[in-house]
Image (cartoon, rainbow, N blue to C red):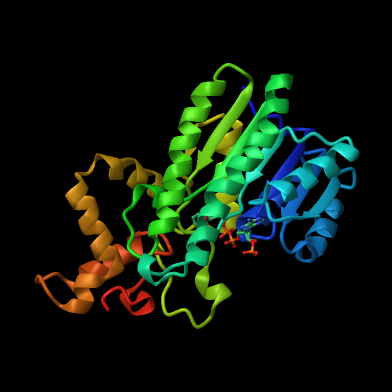
């Protein structure tokens, strides 16, 4: 069983994002129609031209929407129906992950994290799944994060959201088993080069496991094509993510502490700042440094 990508209609959320754009590029020579959804649709016009230059027979639909709002999602669905487009595949790559201690975040930021990472994907799946089931063919690819396996100070709400989706998709997959609908949860590690995006960035997080957006999207799509339930793109990342759940919780908590560099800054417990920096380098981006987050204050 494979998701109906070839000559199909594919809806991509988070299409403005680094990964969303890369999914669009890599699917452009396979799909019949790409529906790109983003709150800033004007940022997608150049991409749309690039995609149509790659594949002149490709239909590209750009839609502006906040997909955490039911009325906006219904508007998207109605607009697609009026163009006789029924997406057979959903690539859900929208998300947010502000980095700050939970108590220091505004409730609006927390709410936005939960809305973007939980409500939005569930809402879209709720709207799209019935037609996939009726056609006995469909595909849902959700891009979460390897953070779902980690305990990360400074990313508590985002970790909660990613873990929630992991559990949700595992259960949903069992509900639709044998129906012709493929469900894949992709949990990438670090993607892209932060120094390219921000030349002032002092050091790249997780340099050993970092993939380019193109590599990451390619590996995720290959796993989705194979109907894999869970994809950890990249060999090193896959090994670490596979091993983490086997570690005792106290050890995983210790990893979280080291990752945040708390002991290094406090200089307590005899822990090694070099080890803390090393662990920080192994873990995904978004693992905050104490100075940036005020974790020790
Ligand atoms: N980049 C990485 O290193 C990395 C690593 C692991 C996992 N991931 C995950 O992969 C996914 C894509 O990552 P990325 O770094 O490419 O993303 P990104 O650059 O953070 O962009 C995410 C996009 O989703 C959009 N979005 C958020 N809430 C939305 C909503 N309610 N309705 C519509 N669009 C919404 C954002 O819009 P705005 O522009 O308005 O914010 C943004 O364009 C995310 O889920 C992220 O957690 C990324």
Q: Position of residue 295 (x, y in %)?
A: 30, 73
Could you tell me which residue is drawn at 73 percent across and 32 percent down? Answer: 88
Q: Quadrant of residue 39?
A: bottom right
* 180 with respect to 118 (left or right): right
Query: As drawn, which residue projects farthest toward the bottom?
Result: 200
Residue at 89 percent of width and 43 percent of height: 57
Q: Position of residue 286 (x, y in %)?
A: 43, 64
Position of residue 203 measured from the top left corner of the image (x, y, whole percent): 41, 75
Say if 256 sits above or below 245 in the image.
below
Task: Say if 14 sits above or below 248 in the image.
Answer: below
Q: Residue furthest top?
A: 178
Pick the quarter of the image with the C terminus. bottom left
Is residue 209 in sight in this rendering? no
Q: Is residue 4 visible?
A: yes
Residue drawn at x 16%, y 71% is 272
**Quarter of the figure with the N terminus:** top right
Residue at 38% in and 77% down: 292
Is residue 184 shown left or right of residue 260?
right
Query: For the image shown, how many numbered marks are present on the structure?
Result: 0
Quarter of the view holding residue 207: bottom left
Closer-to-camera residue (21/257): 257
On the image, the x and y values in percent for residue 113 come to 51, 58
Q: Which of the four quarters of the rendered structure image does ligand 1 lie in?
A: bottom right
Residue 118 located left or right of residue 284: right
């Amino acid at each position: 069983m494979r998701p109906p990508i070839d000559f199909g209609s594919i809806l991509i959320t988070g299409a403005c994002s680094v990964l969303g754009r890369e999914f669009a590029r890599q699917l452009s020579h396979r799909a019949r129609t790409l529906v790109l959804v983003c709150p800033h649709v004007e940022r997608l016009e150049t991409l749309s031209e690039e995609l149509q230059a790659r594949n002149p027979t490709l239909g590209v639909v750009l839609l502006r929407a906040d997909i955490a709002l039911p009325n906006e999602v219904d508007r998207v669905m109605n607009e697609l129906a009026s163009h006789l487009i029924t997406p057979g595949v959903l690539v859900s790559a929208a998300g947010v992950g502000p980095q700050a201690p939970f108590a220091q975040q505004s409730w609006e930021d927390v709410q936005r994290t939960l809305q973007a990472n939980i409500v939005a994907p569930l809402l879209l799946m709720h709207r799209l799944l019935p037609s996939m089931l009726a056609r006995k063919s469909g595909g849902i690819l959700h891009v979460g994060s390897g953070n779902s396996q980690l305990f990360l100070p400074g990313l508590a709400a985002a970790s909660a959201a990613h873990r929630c989706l992991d559990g949700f998709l595992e259960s949903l997959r069992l509900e639709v088993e044998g129906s012709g609908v493929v469900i894949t949860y992709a949990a990438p590690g670090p993607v892209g080069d932060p120094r390219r995006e921000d030349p002032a960035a002092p050091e790249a997080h997780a340099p050993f496991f970092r993939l380019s957006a193109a590599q990451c999207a390619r590996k995720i799509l290959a796993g989705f094509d194979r109907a894999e339930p869970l994809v950890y793109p990249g060999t090193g990342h896959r090994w670490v993510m596979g091993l983490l759940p086997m570690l005792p919780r106290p050890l995983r908590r210790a990893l979280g502490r080291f990752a945040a560099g708390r002991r290094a800054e406090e200089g307590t417990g005899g822990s090694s700042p070099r080890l803390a920096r090393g662990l920080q380098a192994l873990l995904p981006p978004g693992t905050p440094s104490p100075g940036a987050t005020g974790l020790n204050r």
